[in-house]
């Protein structure tokens, strides 16, 4: 018997897999190296994962950077729920916990980490949230998947996979820490299994 799902959860095996566990691992390794190169090392680097799936992605990236550099990387989490501009029209999950690493973010390079970049509205909300936490020297964006359809002038600095998609498609990211396995799947919204 399949596990119960949340409303809107795409736990059915419809659509097709565009990234499997090995693809995700390779993409995160590449993103980790790009972050290090762009930052010219691990100094003053802070990774902030956006809830929900950006948090484990940020932790994985930090582990990869630490394995290369031998230096622990500051990792935190960022909840943008109360900064969203669509709270009235789209019910959201309850607020999650924002965790700022020791040392804060002032004067540091902050890399926001998220699973899918779509309209750009979540990232705009994240920028507002970061602004309330402090004043970093630089804010960058790393995403596992960029699916296009931007509504705001926001672009990722580090992308695991560019995945052109139709608005009628759903891109679902599953991660081992939350879902029990790693994959990125694309399917038609409302498709039957």
Image (cartoon, rainbow, N blue to C red):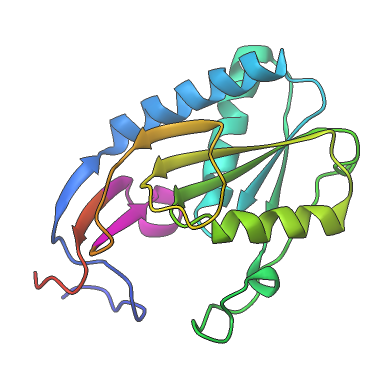
Total labels drawn: 0
* Image-based side of 181 in relation to 99, left or right: left
In the rendered image, the quadrant that contains the N terminus is bottom left
Q: Quadrant of residue 112?
A: top right
Q: Position of residue 26 (x, y in %)?
A: 38, 25
Q: Position of residue 79 (x, y in %)?
A: 67, 63
**Residue at point 55% right, 24% down?**
32
Nearer the observer, 51 or 136: 136
Q: Which residues are magenta?
A: 169-184
Quarter of the figure that contains the C terminus: bottom left
Q: Is residue 88 left or right of residue 178?
A: right
Q: Say which residue appears at 53% left-offset and 54% top-offset.
A: 120
Image coordinates for residue 18, horizontal then vertical, percent: 22, 41
**108 vs 90: above or below:** above
Task: Decide if residue 101 is in sight here.
Answer: yes
Q: Residue at x 78, y 53 (%)?
A: 130
Compared across the picture, whether 105 is left or right of 28 comes to: right
Residue 112 part of the magenta-drawn span: no
Q: Is residue 78 visible?
A: no
> Residue 13's x, y, as percent?
15, 60
Q: Is residue 115 above or below residue 63?
A: below
Q: Quadrant of residue 85?
A: bottom right
Nearer to the camera, 90 or 113: 90
Task: Note whether 46 is above or below 166 in the view shown.
Answer: above
> What residue appears at the point 71 percent right and 53 percent down from the top-left corner?
127
């Amino acid at each position: 018997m399949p596990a119960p799902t949340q409303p809107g959860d795409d736990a059915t095996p419809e659509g097709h897999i565009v990234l499997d566990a090995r693809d995700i691992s390779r993409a995160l390794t590449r993103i980790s190296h790009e972050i290090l190169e762009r930052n010219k090392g691990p100094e003053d680097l802070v990774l902030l994962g956006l809830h929900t799936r950006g948090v484990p992605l940020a932790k994985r990236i930090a582990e990869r950077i630490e394995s290369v550099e031998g230096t622990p990387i500051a990792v935190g989490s960022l909840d943008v729920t109360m900064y969203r501009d669509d709270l009235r029209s789209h019910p959201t999950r309850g607020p999650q916990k924002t965790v700022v690493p020791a040392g804060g973010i002032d004067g540091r390079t902050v890399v926001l980490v998220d699973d899918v970049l779509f309209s750009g509205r979540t990232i705009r909300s994240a920028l507002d949230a970061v602004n309330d936490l402090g004043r970093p020297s630089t804010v960058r964006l790393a995403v596992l998947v960029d699916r296009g359809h931007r509504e705001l002038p926001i672009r990722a600095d580090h992308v695991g996979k560019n995945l052109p998609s139709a608005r009628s498609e759903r891109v679902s990211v599953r991660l081992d820490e939350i879902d029990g396995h790693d994959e990125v799947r694309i399917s038609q919204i409302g498709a039957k299994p």
